[in-house]
Amino acid sequence: MSDAVSVVNQALLAVGADPITTFGDETTESKVAAVRYAPIKRAFLRSYPWNCATRRVALTEYPTPPISGFDKQFNLPPNSVRILQVWAGDMQPEAYRNGERAYSIEGSKLLINETAVSVVYVEDIPEAEFDSHVEEALVAKLAFEFSYTFVASNTTQQQFSVISEAKLQEARTTDSLENPATILRIDGLTRVRH
């Protein structure tokens, strides 16, 4: 099982840098990793609805209603990096109702005119919960991000960019094949256009 240090070490070794023991080491590698790892990981997780990081939860209502626009607000999960779906009871609300937004995400709150709300979201999960392809793609992304710092070569950085994109595409493809295909609804306007 991986942890943050082992994920970072895979990337550091890929670019020819020395591995770290902790993020608190007094080495350049540790200092760079301590500053860069968490934001890169969160952006990486936010970039795609990874199955291993997707969660569902019923939200708790915030005691104070919003100032305007909506009747209620709910606390979003603290480790969420991206909201994928919003559900009101058993129904997924339309994005717009009568020309108005059905809900709004503002900071760590979801504003909506519903009483029971749940969400499907991407969570900032621990590394031990990563799918193997997701971990490889993150390692490749980190290697790309670290490459110029430790190698100082635009050519090497470009090579890591190509590797990172290939690993990302492989991980996304594998991840998407685990779920059934989404069936698109065809309405009258779609039939007319085709």
Image (cartoon, rainbow, N blue to C red):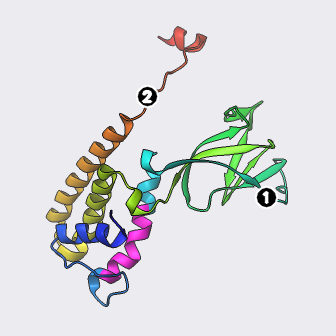
Q: Residue furthest bottom?
A: 26
For disc 1, the marked residue is 62
Q: Quick one: 128 or 104, which is closer to the camera?
A: 128
- Does residue 48 appear in the picture of this structure? no
Q: Main secondary structure of the magenta part?
A: helix
The magenta stretch is: 30-41
Rendered-image quadrant of the N terminus:
bottom left
Point out which mark residue 180 bears.
Answer: 2
Q: Give the quarter of the image for residue 78.
A: bottom right
Which residue is located at x 72 percent, y 44 percent?
117
| Amino acid type, mark 2 | Pro
Determine the CA span between mark 2 and mark 1.
35 Å
Which residue is located at x 43 percent, y 69 percent?
38
Binning the other alpha carbons within 10 Å of mark 1 as few (below 14), some (14 to 19) or many (20 upward) gives some
Secondary structure of the residue carrying tag 2 is: loop
In percent of width and height, residue 6 lies at 29, 70
